[in-house]
Amino acid sequence: MKRRLLLVSNSTLHGGGYLDHFHCSPLVLFVPYALHDRDAYTKTARDKFTSLGYELNGIHEALDPVSAVRKAEAIFIGGGNTFRLLKSLYDNELVTEIKRRVLEDGVPYMGSSAGTNVATVSINTTNDMPIVYPPSFSAIGLVPFNINPHYLDQDPKSRHMGETREQRITQYHEEPDTPCVLGLREGSMLLVEGNTATLLGTTSARLFTRMGPGDGEL
Amino acid sequence: MKRRLLLVSNSTLHGGGYLDHFHCSPLVLFVPYALHDRDAYTKTARDKFTSLGYELNGIHEALDPVSAVRKAEAIFIGGGNTFRLLKSLYDNELVTEIKRRVLEDGVPYMGSSAGTNVATVSINTTNDMPIVYPPSFSAIGLVPFNINPHYLDQDPKSRHMGETREQRITQYHEEPDTPCVLGLREGSMLLVEGNTATLLGTTSARLFTRMGPGDGEL
């Protein structure tokens, strides 16, 4: 499998600086759907990528987004709201096309935060507020597990009564047929090359499995 | 309108101690759908309510949940996961029936956390992880606005890169036709009697309107 992915925990444009992991200088197709102001988001992304020596086009600038994906040399999906992002991917009929390009044609894929969520099995483990209703929580499925970006360890001093991140993921695993979840701390990212996944960064990650006792630090 | 609601910010069983707001001693129908172990949750709730002098039955113990709602003297929906709760309400065809009983028959309704979310227009402003896919985000609609329970003010010392609660609600209001959102801090609750809503507790609340400048402390 030609798969080349870089899945970053952090928000918005982190990940751009890591294009050199792919050892090429592609024209990048940027997907700004996770934020409301697509023009402003694309301008910020373009400024950053230009300074790094890459060209970048916003997918919303294309007349036909499916055709833009068919021609893309690399795809970068930025962070923001995961529900808004996935709904727009479905509304523009891009989920299947991105999957095909990345898994069959080997087009490099980068995702930050929400862009990492949509690369996995489903968005069931996003931290975002469900501000819009997508037609499904199933995502692009570039890897056979889920990721929880911005993974936060419990603060023993917190008096807040909302569930901890660990409790939330455990509740997910109470549901049937749920995949593993990689809790990816800010500062970490996952590089996937073919069937090999390498954890990069300094903060490491925590893997949650449905059976519970298999949980572990990576 | 006979509406009598007590909508509590905090998790799980908070709210039980406040039944005296309703000046009656009803047999309470408890809805434990937001947690996985419905028996254990109902036992905890029953122990607490019994100590306060109230009788309580779990809706999942009834052969026909719709009929249980039709006979209920008071309804208490406990906290947990909002997506799981709303999906179960739809699966058991209870959304319309609870709305009718509360708005037409004046049956008192209490909700904690997720039970507060489902009492509003929609669950678009829950903090919970979307661990299951409900058939809609539209909720019971006992009030014409949304609530964000466990509302958290921004921590100026935080270095976490996830969105603040304020940013999340602002993103919701970037979407068309979105109602006001009451950010209800832990320790606060809203008592609704007819067309009058009274904020109780010591921590107050923050009201977000779609236009932005109308935001204010309550």
Image (cartoon, coloured by chain):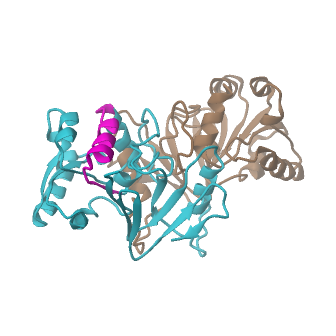
Chain colours: A brown, B cyan
Identified at 72% across, 35% down, the residue is A108
Identified at 75% across, 40% down, the residue is A22
Quadrant in the picture for residue A141? top right
Q: Is residue A28 left or right of residue B74?
A: right
Q: What stretch is highlighted in magenta?
A: B91-112
Location of residue B109 in the rendering, given as x and y in whole percent from the top left corner = 28, 53
Viewer-nearest residue: B29 or A168: B29
Q: Is residue B142 visible?
A: yes
Q: Is A182 drawn above or below residue B215 in the view shown?
A: above
Identified at 52% across, 47% down, the residue is A126
Q: Is residue B72 left or right of residue A104?
A: left
Q: Is B116 drawn above or below residue A153 in the view shown?
A: above
Location of residue A84 in the rendering, given as x and y in whole percent from the top left corner = 62, 41
Q: Is B213 drawn above or below residue B43 in the view shown?
A: below
Q: Is residue A192 within the magenta segment?
A: no
Q: Is residue B109 within the magenta segment?
A: yes
Viewer-nearest residue: A217 or A123: A123
Quadrant in the picture for residue B113? bottom left
